[in-house]
Image (cartoon, rainbow, N blue to C red):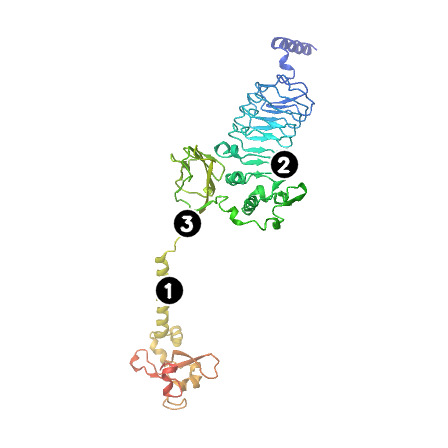
Amino acid sequence: MARLVLQSTLLCLLRVGLGTQDFLPHTPHNCPHKCVCAADLLDCAGLGLREVPVTLPAAAADLDLSHNALQRLPPGWLAPLSRLHTLHLNHNELEALGRGVFTNASGLRVLDLSSNALRALGRHDLDGLGALETLLLFNNHLAHLDERAFHRLGTLRRLYLGRNELSFFSFNHLHGLGSAHLRVLDLSSNRIGRTPVPDLAALPAFLKNGLYLHNNPLPCDCRLYHLLRRWHQRGLSAVSDFAREYTCLAFKVPTSRVRFFAHNRVFENCSVALAKDLERPEEQLHVQVGRSLRLHCNTSAPALHVAWVSPQHELLVAPGSRNGSIAVLADGSLAIGSVQPWHEGVFVCLATGPRLHHNQTHEYNVSVSFPHPEPDAFNTGFTTLLGCAVGLMLVLLYLFAPPCPGCRRCYHRTCRCCHRCRRWPRTPSPLQELSAQSSVLSNTPPDAPSRKASVHKHVVFLEPGRRGLNGRVQLAVAEDFDLYNPSGLRLKAGSESTSSTASEGLVMT
């Protein structure tokens, strides 16, 4: 009992000395009412808010105010949030933005304004968003965009403007160095009825691959048809993935919509000459691994600024790439000291200048291959020569040094000299029984007593039979031929008459 009292006393003294705040749950500082604050996340979604919370925690990096009833955003309201990089304002009732709304959002990278009631975008509505990479404006009522509304978004990569009421879109302010980072431009499901085809054709390749124009009342223009068809043939995903949704108005009537790639009869009278020089083709280059490569940005007039975009979508300016393998020289050209497989793809040059009416691009499609090893002529020739020499030696050994069958028996009986084998009786050779072949080689009949049975029989010539052999080989046997006395070699024709000697060939006997 005394121990319990002592422990309680000590606990009370400790709480009085250190304070009770360390024993109570810690609540986030400046967390708005009903919102959820967790580390750098501030979630105020779906609370029916009509005004932006007055107090916002400075540690918030991800702020979610979606699915509320916000109608306006006060200027400078993001000043406390110096760490903010993601802002969700989608599914609200915003009708306009206004100047200074994002003044203190210099670190913001993702801004979601989709599913609101925005009708226009002014020149200064997006000021302060210098680090913005993704801007979502789809599913609004946008009918007017200032041509310089996106001009200060130098790092913008994805712009979504689908499901609005745009009837025209100018590509001038999106082309060149101002939009060098832009990869996705979604203009689908609008009311765009006229498009500047030359401006579309002048866009860089990486932006053509992410330009979505489907579900718009595009005109059935021959030049536009040839341009989109070429993009489809090249496999650009923005066109090939939505090929069935690309439509055009045949007679400027909403009910006369036809599909670009399904109704070719509408464009059967289009001349290919109209599309000539409309789109500048890529320059094809082939280079081997380890070689050097230099690309020049060819423009119609001197350029004030030159930049390149690599196949990995990296913006290349002087001095060059991050890994140091690509250099941008003072004259604007691009140099690669040692080409590697990851350098394969499309390099795009972006050039701007006062004398360039439109910012120009030049594209190189680089193919990288490994060098083929050259065959070693010395090894191949030496191998062939060695094979011929070995074959010749085997033929000579076969012709002039045939094995003596009796010697094998002689060796088994410890004979010292192989010539003694001649004294041993031998069984008749199968060749001796070939009387027909033997008669061809000798004038003496096979049964004549002058015929000498010799063990030095040797096949010296192979001749195809002329009659009754059906292409089988006829053996010509030479008897009484002494290997040590080749001077007794006679040539005799194995035919019925001497007149056929030249035509049938000579037989060595």
Label 1 crowd (10 A; few <14 / some 14-19 / many >=20): few
Q: Nearer the viewer, residue 221 or 246?
A: 221
Occupied quadrant, residue 231: top right
Disc 2 residue type?
Arg
Of pointers 2 and 1, the one earlier in the residue sequence: 2
Q: Nearer the viewer, mark 2 or mark 1?
A: 2
Label of residue 371 in the image: 3
- Mark positioned earlier in the residue sequence (3 or 2): 2
* Spatial separation of the CA atoms under disc 2 and disc 1: 80 Å
Query: Which residue in the structure is indicated by mark 2?
Result: 191
User: Mark 3 touching mark 2, by CB under 8 A?
Assistant: no
- Left or right of 22? Residue 372 is left
Q: Picture coordinates of residue 258 (x, y %)?
A: 64, 45
From the image, tell me which residue sits under label 1.
387
Residue in the picture at 42% in, 45% down: 289
- Give the answer, above or below, for where 391 lies relative to 440: above
Name the quadrant containing residue 327: top left
Q: Amino acid at mark 1?
A: Gly
Residue nearer the viewer, 167 or 27: 167
Measured as percent of width and height from the top left, residue 241 is found at 60, 43
From the viewer's perspective, is the residue at label 1 or at label 3 nearer? 3
Count of marks, rendered view: 3
Name the residue: 42% across, 46% down.
287
- Residue 308: image x %, image y %? 45, 36
Q: Earlier in the sequence, mark 1 or mark 3?
A: 3
Q: Which one is in front, 256 or 52?
A: 256
Callout 2: few (<14), some (14-19), or many (20+) C-alpha neighbours within 10 Å?
some
Query: Label 1 to label 3, Cα distance in Å?
Result: 31 Å
For residue 160, side relative to residue 371 (left or right): right
Three-letter residue code for mark 3: Pro
Rounded to the nearest angstrom, the CA distance separating label 3 from label 2 is 53 Å
